């Protein structure tokens, strides 16, 4: 049920014709000849696959993914976009790529899109629980960013100058906003806030009254 083929010299044709209808985990990471991925919907042999790791290859295009996939690790590639994702997908690691934007991920719960070229936050659905957008080019965080079910947010190492949220929902536990360029911080935590970690390190432009405001919140 597991097939590990990392650190080889595979191309797409090298593994696409594998005849294994019970395969659940496929790891083809660290194969520099692998530049494209295409799991055609007509190829029923991949319908059992739940986890796919194609990290540290040279993939610049993904055409199709297995229809029941739950985990996709495609970090450290040359991707600029993702295909239409299966409804079963819950975890996506697309860090260290060349994304300038990410379309709404309707069913994903955990997203790592750090170390890309994003200039705006992706649109989040109420399903998302954890998101890492650190090391991008995002400048503004607005009231539509924090989803209702989200627990962990990392937006550190972005050129963010304004952080404005009317409400932080009581599911949020960790908020990392370190080493950005904040000069406006405005959000409200209710009495039932669950935030355990609020990190605002190396924000030299943040006014003193904003820092005092943070101390008064329920954190």
Image (spheres, rainbow, N blue to C red):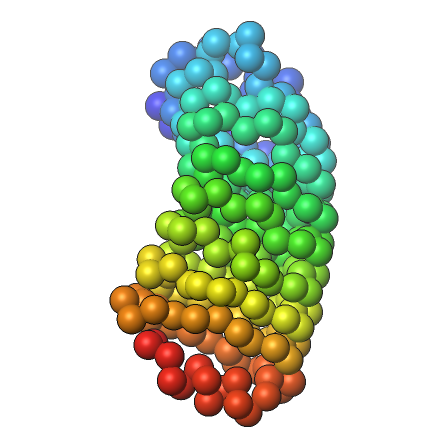
Q: Is residue 55 above or below residue 172?
A: above
Q: Quadrant of residue 135?
A: bottom right
Q: Is residue 77 visible?
A: no
Q: Nearer the viewer, residue 50 or 191?
A: 191
Q: Residue at x 55, y 7 (%)?
A: 42
Q: Is residue 8 above or below residue 44?
A: below
Q: Residue at x 29, y 71 (%)?
A: 191
Q: Position of residue 111 (x, y in %)?
A: 50, 47
Residue lying farthest to the left in this orientation = 192
Residue lying farthest to the bottom in this orientation = 208
Q: Nearer the viewer, residue 196 or 145?
A: 145
Q: Quadrant of the C terminus?
A: bottom left
Residue lying farthest to the front in this orientation = 166
117 lies left or right of 30: right
Q: Quadrant of residue 59?
A: top right
Q: Quadrant of residue 88?
A: top left
């Amino acid at each position: 049920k597991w097939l590990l083929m990392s650190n080889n010299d595979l191309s797409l044709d090298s593994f696409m014709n594998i005849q294994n209808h019970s395969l659940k985990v496929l790891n083809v990471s660290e194969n520099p000849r692998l530049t494209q991925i295409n799991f055609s919907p007509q190829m029923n042999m991949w319908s059992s696959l739940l986890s796919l790791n194609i990290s540290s290859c040279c993939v610049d295009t993904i055409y199709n993914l297995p229809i029941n996939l739950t985990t996709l690790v495609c970090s450290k590639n040359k991707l600029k976009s993702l295909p239409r994702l299966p409804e079963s997908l819950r975890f996506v690691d697309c860090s260290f790529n060349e994304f300038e934007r990410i379309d709404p991920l309707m069913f994903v719960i955990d997203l790592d899109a750090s170390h890309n070229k994003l200039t705006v936050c992706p649109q989040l659905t109420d399903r998302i629980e954890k998101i890492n957008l650190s090391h991008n080019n995002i400048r503004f965080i607005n009231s539509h960013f924090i989803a209702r079910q989200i627990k962990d947010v990392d937006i550190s190492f972005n050129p963010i100058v304004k952080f404005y949220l009317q409400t932080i929902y009581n599911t949020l536990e960790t908020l990392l906003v370190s080493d950005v360029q904040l000069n406006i911080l405005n959000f409200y935590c209710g009495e039932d806030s669950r935030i355990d970690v609020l990190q605002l390190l190396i924000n030299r432009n943040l006014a003193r009254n904003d820092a005092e405001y943070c101390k008064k919140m329920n954190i």
